[in-house]
Structure formats: C-alpha cells, structure tokens
Amino acid sequence: MLGHLNTVDIEKVLLSQIIGRIGCYAKGQVYVVPITYAYDGNYIYGHSREGLKINSMRQHPKVCFEVDNMEDMANWQSVIIQGEYQELLGQKARAAMSFLLTKLAPLLTSETSMLGRGMQRFHHSEISTIKTVVFRIKILEKTGRFERK
C-alpha cells in the first residue's frame, strides 16, 4: 500500500534519522548531496566545509531536503522539505554546532565528519581559523510518502 505520511509520521521520520540529502542549484545543474543533520521541529541544522554546496546555497538559497527511513523495498518512508538556506554566525552558529554534536556525537567515526574536532575548536580561541560553515534550512513545506506491505 502506498500513501501520504501524516504530520505526526513526518515528524517521527525527521527526528529519527541523521542523514538527509540537500538538493540545490549549482553551475546550471541540480546538485544533490548527503549531509548529517539535526532537526529541532522548526529547522534542519547542518555543517560543511566551504565548497560547491555552500557557494551554491549562498547564491540560490531555495533548497530541497530529503530524508528516508527504509526497512526494505516494500516498507519505507520518505520526507521532502522545501526550504531556505540560512547561514549561521556567532552565538547562533555555536548553539547549532552544540545541538548537532549532541545528536551526532555518539555516531562520529569518520575523518570527513569533522564535527567533533570542529566543536572543540569552536569553544576556543581558534574560532577565526575554522573553515566550517554552520547553517540551517528554514522549513517552508513538508510532505511525506510511504509504502507498506
């Protein structure tokens, strides 16, 4: 059976996952890239090094964000968000990094995650040398679909 997720189920998917995909417009093409994220009920929070994704979202802040919860090919849920990229600085960025760290820290094992080391530096005098960009996606619309056997 295919169907639409209700508001409660959309929230459950967003709160239960940590990997999503951002869709943005980059160099004349649609660019989709996975990120780790944290969701607080209002915003999707993320971080990244500067590069194509960040530069693209700065130029074209309207983005799409997608999250899946997949048991198997016949049992899955998918949420799509239409939103707006917002770069965070100062105290807002520190609070967002702390929120991300709280949700993601137990899972950090890779060199590319960089969140653990970034957070350590974020609370010290090296703040100006961090090349990590902290951002959030302001949610404008949420929709969801599912399939169940």
Image (cartoon, helix red, strand yellow):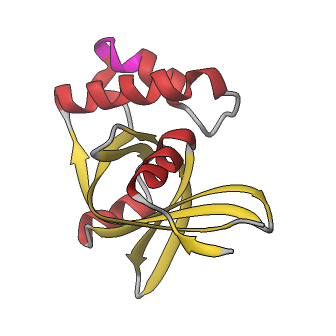
**Residue at image coords 43%, 21%:** 119
Q: Position of residue 9 (x, y in %)?
A: 49, 52
**Drawn side of residue 95 relative to residue 6, left or right:** left
Residue closest to the eye, 134 or 27: 134
- Residue 35 picture location, percent across and down: 53, 51
- Residue 114 vertical placement versus 75 (above, below): above
Quarter of the image with the C terminus is: bottom right
Vertical comparison of 81 with 71: above or below = below
Asked whether, in this view, residue 136 is left or right of residue 7, the answer is: left
Is residue 103 shown above or below 67? above
In magenta segment, residue 122: yes
* Spot occupied by residue 129 in the image (x, y as percentages of width and height): 34, 29
Q: Is residue 30 magenta?
A: no
Q: Quadrant of the N terminus?
A: bottom right
For the question of whether residue 36 can be seen, the reply is: no
Q: Residue at x 29, y 13 (%)?
A: 125
Q: Which residue is painted at 55% across and 29% down in the image?
A: 104
Residue 65 in which image quadrant: bottom left
Q: Does any portion of residue 47 appear in the rendered image?
A: yes
> Image quadrant of residue 69?
bottom right
Estimate the x, y position of residue 11 in percent, counting from the top left.
43, 48
Q: Which residues are magenta?
A: 121-125
Residue for point 25% across, 67% down: 61
Dominant SS type (magenta): helix
